[in-house]
Image (spheres, rainbow, N blue to C red):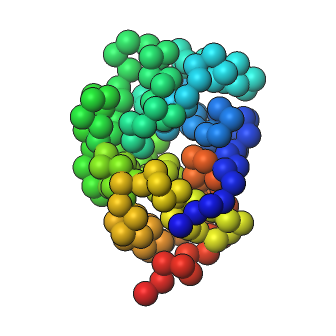
Amino acid sequence: MSDNKMNPLPTGQFKDNIFAVNNEFVSWLMIKSNSGYVAIDMGVDNDKSSKEIASFGASFKDIVAVILTHDHRDHKEGLSAINKGTPVYGRSDEFATIKVQDEQSIDIDGLNFKVYATPGHKEDHISLVLNNKYLITGDCMSLDGNKVNLFVAQYNLNNEQQTKDIKRLSKIPNIEYLITTHFGAITSPDFSNFRE
C-alpha cells in the first residue's frame, strides 16, 4: 500500500511530443498530434490548467480528443472547457462518447494507443501504451523512487484487483517510460513487489 508523497510532473514538455499540465497534486497530459493535442485526462482546476497550457503555447481549443483514464473529479473537471463535440474516449458510462475495450488499439490524429482495462482503482479505469513506448497508468499505481507500489489504498476500489492490474502491466515489453498521474514518471520501473 502506498503512503508515498504525491509528486506529479511539472508543467511543460516531458519528452518528445508529450506535455504535462500540473494541477498541484495531479498532472495530466497533452500529446502533440497531427492537428492539435490529444489530452490524457483533464485535471481538476480549469483556470490553473488554462494558465499552465498557455505556458507552452496551447489552449483548451487545441485539444482534438480526450482519453479519460477514469472519471474521478481530479481527472475529468477540464472536460467542461473543451470544444463541444470533441470525442472523449474511455470506459466511463457518464463521460465517454467513444467506448474503448480492453486491449483495443486506437489511432487518434497520428497517435497510437493500446488500451488496458485496469479496474482495481475504479471500474472504468484504463491504462494506455502510447506509440509502443510510453506506459501511462493514471491511478493504477504509485511510485517510491523507481519502486512500483499500489496506489493510495483508501482510494482504490479493490487492492487485490489492482495488484493483478500492475502484474499485467509489468509484462508489457519495450516500455521506455512509465508515467503516472500523481507520482511522476520513471524510465526503469522496479516491479519486484509484484513478481510471482
Residue 178 sits above or below residue 19 on the image: below
Q: Nearer the viewer, residue 10 or 110?
A: 10
Which residue is at the far front? 154
User: Where the C terminus falls, by quadrant?
Assistant: bottom left
Is residue 112 visible in this depiction of the protein?
yes
Q: Residue 48's spot in the image, x, y percent?
A: 67, 21
Name the side, left or right, on which 122 lies relative to 111.
Answer: left
Q: Toward the viewer: 135 or 24? A: 24
One can see residue 134 in this view: no
Residue located at (70% from left, 49% from top): 7
User: Residue 16 placed where, x, y %?
Assistant: 67, 45
In the displayed structure, 123 sits above or below 18; it is: below
Q: Please determine whether, in this image, residue 74 is positioned above or below residue 77.
A: below
Residue at position x 38%, y 20% in the image: 86
Residue 66 is left or right of residue 178, and the answer is left
Task: Determine which quarter of the picture holds residue 191.
Answer: bottom right
**Horizontal and vertical percent position of residue 40:** 49, 38
Q: Residue shown at 54%/79% (left/top)?
A: 193
- Image check: 31 left or right of 154? right
**Considering depth in this image, is 143 or 91 the residue closer to the camera?**
143
User: How many numbered callouts?
Assistant: 0
Residue 104 on image: x %, y %: 29, 52
Residue positioned 38% across, 12% down in the render: 84
Where residue 60 sits, quadrant-wise, is top right
